[in-house]
Image (tube, rainbow, N blue to C red):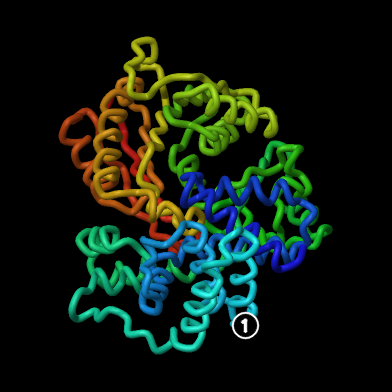
Amino acid sequence: MADENLRMLAVDMLMEVSEHEKYSHVVLRQTLEKHEHLPKRDRAFLTRLFEGTIERQITLDFVIDYFSKTKVKKMKPLIREILRMSAYQIMYMDSVPDSAACNEAVKLAKKRGLSGLSGFTNGVLRAIAAGWKDVKFPSEDENLAYALSVKYAMPEWIVSLWISDYGIQKTREILKNISDNKNSGFYVRVNTGKITLDSLVKKFANQGIAAEKIDEISDALCVSGADNIENLPGFSDGEFYVQDISSMRVAHLAGAKEGDFVIDVCAAPGGKALHVAQFLRGSGMVEARDISEAKVALIEENRKRMGVENLRAVVMDATAFDENSVGKADVLICDLPCSGLGVMRKKPDIRHRMTESQAAELAALQQKILGISCNYLKPGGTLIYSTCTIHRAENEENVEWFLKDHPQFELISEEQIFPGENGGDGFFIAKLCKRK
């Protein structure tokens, strides 16, 4: 596909996210599936342009506003996305000549019926190309949170939150690790009931795909050189499951034993539940619950692909008390809905969707689900509480609240994993035990 058409495709994808509020990872996956004929180079270009523009949006808007009389917020949505995408190429993609970024943007504006704004588009982009390196960015001495927000393209409320929770130095580290994300690869959990790690590594190698073992997680591989996961050898046969290594720690910490009954109260798409079932070696049962038929269908689809028999997917609302489950579970997994601030490297649009008030509402929802679900655990049983966020109110503070309100539980361990710290996502895991 010509670069011109790739840029048009990228603009359409950006509009889906910004104007139609679709999730970036869903839009990207659907687009790549629809255009599966695209060469690997084109898929990589499209992915980087789309995700990079969303990820760097705050910085891009600051630079565009610096050179444009019409501010970003007042622009027509299509012109706004064309300018953002083109400014991203100028500022962050060395392989793209500035002239190409400008010229293709003008062509795009004309093709989309905005010829009257093609001169404006050209003028702003030429000015950016000539002068963006001389832009005076906000001073850290005057307003640290705002300066870091613009520098690392992270909403100011999140920067302020992290400074408050973790201090300035750690916040800089978190921002840098998210910003430095190079999409070098992804992680898979090997279905050891079907194939050994070494056999899967050889299978990938035969297709020119590199896979390395991970010291900390015995059944994990880091895969690079692949651009279409579902076409990988072994995917359709359920020989592996794509899952971040931080997330894999849940099943390892849960310590489920053969014959155990496990409840996962918010399980979709089923990665952690399937992982726990694997540890049970065909015995016991994992009940993977979620709120809707669609989510449960997704769990069931993954269950069938992975060939797991000791897991059943059930439609159940975690906020509604289930009397029949009281005292039944040996292990309880509460991987709960959260603000997602730990996975912004993979889902860059979270930073634009999530608000401070929504994060507070999610912390309250987590408390409600924990307070109900803990009744399902047997005395002596293990509760795993986890989120994919970096937010004390949703993590450590919720554990503190829970222990204070439920003295029959004791904390065994808790850890906040920061993005990139172990090569994976930001994640929080607390392991608690119900006293006998």
**Furthest residue to the front?**
116
Q: Secondary structure at mark 1?
A: helix
| Quarter containing the N terminus | bottom right
What percent of the width, then of the height, locates residue 264?
45, 29
Instruction: Read off the residue under disc 1.
Output: 99
What percent of the width, then of the height, locates residue 96?
63, 78
Q: Give the vertical position of 309 relative to 17 (above or below).
A: above
Q: Specify few, some or many for label 1: CA neighbours under 10 Å numbering under 14, 14-19, or 20 or more.
A: few
**Furthest residue to the left?**
404
Q: Give the vertical position of 366 relative to 162 (above or below).
A: above
Q: Give the vertical position of 175 relative to 313 (above or below).
A: below
**Quadrant hosting residue 215:** bottom right
Which residue shows up at 51% across the image and 33% down it? 268
So how many labels did they put on this image? Answer: 1
What percent of the width, then of the height, locates residue 333?
42, 32
Q: Can residue 213 be seen from the camera position used here?
A: no
Which residue shows up at 58% across the image and 29% down it? 299
The residue closer to the viewer here, 193 or 271, is 271
Which residue shows up at 36% across the image and 68% down it? 71
For badge 1, the amino acid type reads: Ser
**Quadrant hosting residue 406:** top left
What percent of the width, then of the height, locates residue 432?
31, 37
The residue closer to the viewer here, 374 or 53, is 53
Which residue shows up at 60% across the image and 23% down it? 310
| Quarter containing the C terminus | top left
**Quadrant hosting residue 321:** top left
Q: Can residue 141 be seen from the camera position used here?
A: yes
Q: Give the vertical position of 333 relative to 234 (above or below).
A: above
**Furthest residue to the top?**
324
| 90 sits to left or right of 328 | right
